Image (cartoon, rainbow, N blue to C red):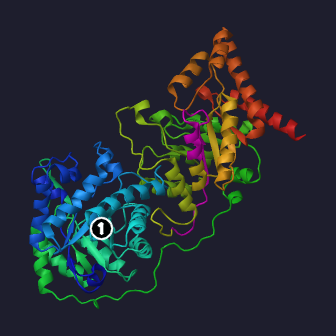
Amino acid sequence: MVDDFREYVRDNVILCDGAMGTQLYERGVFIDRCFDEINLTDPELVKSVHLDYYNAGAKIIETNTFGANPFKLHKYHLEGKTRDINVRGAQLVREVVGDNAWVAGAIGPLGIKIEPWGPTSHEEACQAFSEQVAALLDGGVDVFILETFGDLSEIGEAIRAIKKLSDKPIIAQMTITEDGMSLYGTGPEVFTARLTDWGADVVGLNCSVGPHPMLDTLEKMAQYTELPLSVQPNAGQAKNYDGRYIYLASPDYFAKYAHRFMRVGAHIIGGCCGTTPDHIKSMASVLRMKQFSGAVRQRHAERRNGNGHVDEIPLAQKSALAAKIAAGENIFSLEITPSRGWDLEKTIEKAREAKDAGFDSVNIPDGPRASARIGVIATAAKIHAEVDIEPILHYVCRDRNILGMQSDLLGIYALGLSNLLLLTGDPPVIGDYPKSTAVFDIDSIGLTNLARSLNAGHDIGNRAIGKPTGFLLGVGVNPTAVNVDLEIERFFWKVDAGAEYAISQPVFDPDALLTFIEKSKKYLKEQDLEMVPIVAGIWPLQSLRNAEFLHHEVPGVTIPEEILRRLQDAGTADGEREVGMQVARELIAVVQPYVKGFQFASPFGRVKPAAELMQYAKELIKNRQD
């Protein structure tokens, strides 16, 4: 188009096109194909969709490149064609519309989670978006349209990538749930203000829901930005009829909402999943009949971020365990595995034994080795209520999505439980039900960021939660990981996310633990972070068979051959147990000066061996201090 987009969109309503994927599917493309690749394999089919939307009245035509980034294309082994797919996608639109409509370079999410919710860094995300942006620019787009983003940080990286390479206008659209929140729980008052501050030219919504909830959310957004708004709803919620998903919102229904969208300040109106050229045509007739008035809404000059300042709870005040960590003291914990049934009487009795033996806390694993056991929250709450000892509640990502995790953590704190060990969790394939599904919405790094947010007084959507939580944030480390450098890097990200202490996997190679600690200190110092206390995991081996099981079947545990030989040479069951205890004492003696306590396992539910080792460690510490 010859008109300047930024100037034009401020004073006019522009009709955008509708769904591309829906149309390709209706025209015979199988759902499991890469729709973006069709730019190369069947360009005439793609052009036919563009032409139908253009003839329906759309003046913004999006490229068929929503998923054409290296991460998503990798699924189809097409990452090497990222440039070709995007360049051709822009060219196809231009061939259809010439200079009579704006060519909008469509960019969607990467299909992976970026920090803090996943392992992909902000820089890696920006680089992936940059690759797509550069290709779309070479193809000749007039404007960029960012669509269906649930993570505010990720769309921020997409905006950054565009601004590094171009000054083309940016339409930035989040996707929401029925309650108006983004998929990560961010409220419209937050994401609207952020997108505005980051330099988008138009901010809006698309996908996931139909016109009605989008209208409600759009009204809220209008209070937090002076920018033009955009809206591209689905054709209602998809309904399953005999295995086929049907969208029920009719073109006439969309025409009614087109007028309503304009009245609350929408300057770009289009459609998303389930919409067709008929939907766009119906809205075009409304746009021709209705005169837009930019004065129908009044903006609030004051923008809010939904997250006021709160005073966080100091480390020493979070729990008795946290107070010892803050004072630099050693801590001693006993791991107690939850029962397979609902009766917690034996578990409570073990916790009492631990208290009487002098342990500071009891560790409660969360479905260890993906086993089906009573819930860790109920177990920890019961111990907290009936025994004068603090639980450390293991909490894993395996079984919950990110919203469920937030709900659980708030509930955990409401129950008076403050000590956490945040873990990714063992995959179901190694557990009791290998065919069960795992969630893994985020990993332990993302989970630490989530808990840290609650400690700062806001949820994952950056909305204030009132009083902040006061969790003591612990994480796991594996000094004998196959890729130790990667384990150290992940440890850095956990500390950066807010970890306040770490517990290692059971240690059988003291050199591996000491090397891990030394390298971690150096790496964190280089990144301007301080080392957090390491608590060493100690497992008193009970037999050769027990050792072989740990070595071969428990993820993250490695037992040196020399220890296995010593157990084999012991000759008797009593001899094997004594070798196991001696190995544990040797490990404690070597690593004690470099750690801040121990977590002891209680093999087969036996508290006594762990208690003996704890007393041995305390004697070593006392002798060193004297």
- Of residues 119 and 554, the one nearer the viewer is 119
Image vertical order of residue 116 relative to residue 549, above or below: below
Q: Residues within 10 Å of mark 1 (few under 14, many from 20)?
A: many
Residue 483 image offset from top left, x and y in percent: 55, 36
Left/right placement of residue 208 relative to residue 541 reads: left
Outermost residue, top direction? 571
Residue 596 image offset from top left, x and y in percent: 73, 43
Residue for point 74% across, 30% down: 613
Image vertical order of residue 205 relative to residue 329, above or below: below
Image vertical order of residue 128 relative to residue 266, above or below: above
Quarter-of-image position of residue 273? bottom left
- Of residues 295 and 505, the one nearer the viewer is 295
Residue for point 39% across, 41% down: 438
Query: At numbered mark 1, what does the secondary structure look like: helix, strand or loop?
Result: strand
- Of residues 168 and 183, the one nearer the viewer is 168
Q: Quadrant of the N terminus?
A: bottom left
Quarter-of-image position of residue 145? bottom left
Q: Is there any visible trace of residue 333 in the rendered image?
A: no
Left/right placement of residue 395 relative to residue 127 reads: right
Q: Is there any visible trace of residue 131 in the rendered image?
A: yes
- Magenta span contains residue 550: no
Residue for point 67% across, 42% down: 519
Q: Quadrant of the C terminus?
A: top right
Mark 1 sits on what residue?
145
Bounds of the magenta segment: 465-491
- Magenta span contains residue 473: yes
Residue for point 56% across, 51% down: 493
Looking at the rendered structure, the number of numbered marks drawn on it comes to: 1
Left/right placement of residue 341 relative to residue 173 reads: right
Q: Amino acid at mark 1?
A: Ile
Quarter-of-image position of residue 185? bottom left
